[in-house]
Each structure stands twice: as structure tokens, then as C-alpha cells.
Image (cartoon, rainbow, N blue to C red):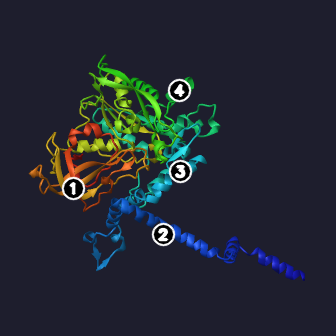
Amino acid sequence: MKPIEAHSTATIHAKVTREEQAAHELGNTGFAPGTRVALVVFFLSVIVAVPLAQLCAAFHQPERVTRLTAGLRALVPDWTRVKAVNGVVSAIDLLPPAAQIKTVEDDWEQNSVVGETLLPRVQSMLLALGQGNEKAYPGRDGWLYYRADFDYVAGPGFLDPKVMKRRTTAGGALKAPQPDPVTAIVHFRDQLAARGIALIVVPSPVKPSIYPEFFSRRYAGRSPIVQNPSFEDFKRRLAQAGVAVFDPAALLAEAKARASELPLYLKTDTHWTPPAMEMTAAALAGFARQTATLPAPQPGRFTTVEKTVEALGDVALMLKLPAGQKVYPPERVRVRQVLEKNRFWRPATDAGVLFLGDSFANIYSLEPMGWGEAAGFVEHLSLALGLPVDAICRNDAGSYATREMLAKELQRGQDRLAGKQLVIWEFAARELAGGDWKRLAMTLGEKRDGGMYVPVAGKTVEIRGVVRAASPAPRPGSVPYKDHIVMVHLAELESADDPAAAGKEAVVFVWSMRGNVATPAARWRPGDTVRLRLRPWADLAGQYEAINRSELEAEELLFAEPAWVE
């Protein structure tokens, strides 16, 4: 072979890219006889098997078909709202809202027979290999971690300008969050200061911050506090702005070092144990008296009684394991319920201290969470202060949920800040990296009648109505709580019990999820006709106010007095 020919061959081979080589290999892939047909048949069988299984289930559970077809109807364009420009209708106008599409997708997923059958079994197999799911991470020695907590401690600094810019542009079709917690907290402090009210901010440490060693062996034998890279800068900025911050992390780390055999967090849950919570409440009470001028303690006003509570943690429930699983057994804790005059402690709206909190406050206070009642963070703060305390608590979304509840009360003309000397705002530290820190107006409005139908106090009324709008309901297992309430706007009311309801509208709260199981209300769509039993929401607000809920944003519903669906 001539040298020039050898050189040419080398040049040709040098010019072949990896993409060209892959295309050549794919184009010349060989199959054994019958393999192609077998693969095609298998692929088509898998595709056909899913709707066939769903169809077979429909004969035994017809409501599944009703739910799925209702979802399809919800995606049909509303021609009454479509506007033509120069005789041309935009294709975008024909698309349903992104939130509506997401709701329908969740409906189909919840009602998937194949998913219900396979998911728990597949998850059990993955767990045997040390794998969790998109919400729950398995750790060592039976410990479980919530992914959002892990993402907070292991993620980039939440105050990094690049991170905040990315968050503000990542909303897509949904409204992007306001990512800067410092701006929102200082703004809220200024709003309170204008009324002579002090503010204390309490970022509750997440489990990986205090117990990283049960997730990663490299922390074994050490007792570090693992925080997001921006956390210290966050506290420094608030200190410079004159905002009081009570950080329980060091307190919990010291307690862990003193008695490592006594866990401060539940193994299968996102929250702290009763001793850790009570210790934090007592320390916070002392800090509060240093921050604001409060009345003297009232000795003997509160007493306690002990009770044993057993439950399975919220992270274990997120794994969606088969019923009766033994991998993660229920945990048992001893709580101290706080009593006032032999009755369970309740918030006092005329108290000088207002507590805003999330599930870290509700965990032993809100009975539907499964860990008892009247034994939570606010109750023990009140006990340690020796004073009554007002409280607005809501599971999840601690960055804005309780502030939003307060703002709406003020806008309705209900001055929840009257007579307050101090507001304590508690939220899970993970909210610093993933929460929506939007500014909210704290303007006191005038009391107005929204014109909606509500039964008289203490009375239950059966009504028939047509759903005009419903707030979104979460998919069971996709959120760190097992109960949820939605708001529904009803029209064209009829009632044999109360003729005064005829033709009126109503705004109602109703369960959308109980014990991680979706209720029929989670699938209500505009146009559905429903029969319900209503009670005034005011009769039960104290019992259900702290449960996580979604609300309709229409301005005309802001001042409406809601009812409760039994």
C-alpha cells in the first residue's frame, strides 16, 4: 500500500465524529429472527394493558369513569370566554389554565388502577435497594428524610443573586415566587412597628441540620449543625436591620451532645420530638421577655397532663408503601397536654402575643396530624410565659400562609393585631430556600357583608348547588401533610330546610383530603351539581383553622363569610 493511501485512510477516520459513528451503528443494528415482531408486540401490549385494566375496574367502581370523564370535560375550551381578534381566535385562548391541566393530571394519576396496584410494590422493592422516591429519602437505622429538607441544607445559598434570579424566572405558566426572605421579613417588621408591635422570627431547624449522621456516614461521631450556605448571612442581614431572630439550632445541638441517646426529631417524620419542642418553647419564652415588654406571668393559670401518642411519620406515609408494612413501624412519644381551667388550651384573640406558625407548631397541637392535641409549640410557649397567647397556624408554606391569613382578616375589618405587643413568626428553615416571600399589605379595612348565604349560628342546613369554582387540591402523598381543605364557590342554591337560601350563592370550605386519601370534593369541577349539609364556618373555625387549605383568589370572595360542609 502506498504511503499516501495510508495517510488518506487515517485522515478519513479522523474526520468521523461520535455522532456519525453512533448513527452508523444504529443504522446497521441486527436483530435475530422474530425479535422485531416480539418487541413491537410487547410494547403495544404494555400500552393497551393500562386502559384495559382501568376499563375492567370501572365495572366494579363506576365512579372512576365519572371522575376521569369530568377531568376531560374540564379541558374542553370555554367558548364563552374566547375572544376573537379580527375574526381569528388565538390557539392560546383555547388552552385551559396550567393549574387546571395539572389538576386533571393529578385526577388521572389518583384514579389509576395500575398505579394503585404497582406503586406500593415497586416502592417496596426500591426501598430494599436503599431508594426512596421524589419526596422521601431513606437514611440509616430506620431514619427517613423529607427531600425538601435535604435540598435546603445541601443546596446552593438561597441568598445567592444567581439562585434568586433563577427562582424568579422559573415560574413558567405559574406565578414566580418572591425569593428574598430578608426583604419580606423586614417589610413585615416595619408594618408591625408602625403599630408599636415587636417581631421575633423563629426559623425552625430541619432534621438534616441536627441529624446529618443518619443520612451520611461522614458525619458519624460528630455533632455539627448543617445549614444552607446563606443561613449565617441571612441572620447577619436581619441583625443589621434590627430584626430579632431566635435560632433554636444551637440549643438543639447542645441538647443532642448532652444526651445523644434521646432523639430530638422523630425518625419517620419531618418534625421534632416533644422534649425538643418543649425545650425550644421555654427558651423562646425567655427571649420574648427580653425583646418586648410583656405582662407578669400568671401562676397556676395553666396545668399539664401527660399522654402517650403513637403514629406513623409523615415521611413514611409519603413512601406509599403497602398497607401493613413493617419496615417503618409507628413511633410512640409522650406528650404533655396544656390545660386551662381543666379544658384544653385554646388561642386567646385578646392576648398580647400573637404566634404565627406552621406544622412545627401544629405537630402536637392539631389532632388531625395524628400526634395528639393541645400539646404543641404554642401551648408550651404560653405555659412557659404564664400568659394567654393568640395563634394563627397553618401547615406548610410558612413563608406567607399565616401572614396571608392575618392580612385577610385585617382586610375584612377584623383587627387581629389590636392590643398586641409582640408577634412571633415561626417557619421551617427550608422555607428560606423554597418559599414564596411575597410582601402582603396589612391594611385594616371596613367590615362588609359579602352577600353570601350562611346558615344561622349553630344550625345545619341541607342545600343543593352548582359548583362555580373550586380551589386546587393537592395529590395525596405529594405534600407533607395528610389532610387538606378546599374552598368552593356555589351558585343557584336550593334548600328545603331554609327557603332563604333559594337563588343565592355561597362560599364553602370542605375536606379535599383525609388521611392521605382524596375525597370526592377534590374532583369537583365547575358545572357539577352537589348536595351538601352546611354549617357556619365560625362554629368550627377554631377546630379546623390550622389545617392546610387552598382558597379562591377572586376579589368578590374576599369579604364573603364562608360556610363549612359536613
| Distance in Å between CA atoms under marks 2 and 1 | 39 Å
Disc 1 to disc 4: CB gap under 8 Å = no
Disc 2, SS: helix
The amino acid marked with disc number 1 is: Leu
**Can you say which quadrant of the picture contains the N terminus?**
bottom right
Disc 3, SS: helix
Q: Residues within 10 Å of mark 4 (few under 14, many from 20)?
A: few
Q: Nearer the viewer, mark 2 or mark 4?
A: 2
Q: Residue at x 24, y 58 (%)?
A: 467
Q: Residues within 10 Å of mark 2 (few under 14, many from 20)?
A: few
Instruction: Please tell me the numbered disc located at residue 3.
Output: none
Instruction: Please tell me the numbered disc located at residue 262.
Output: 4
Q: Dot 3 corresponds to which residue?
A: 123
Q: Dot 2 corresponds to which residue?
A: 48
Disc 4, SS: loop
| Distance in Å between CA atoms under marks 2 and 4 | 53 Å
| N-term mark: 1 or 3 | 3
Q: Dot 1 corresponds to which residue?
A: 490
Nearer to the camera, 356 or 245: 356
| Distance in Å between CA atoms under marks 1 and 3 | 40 Å
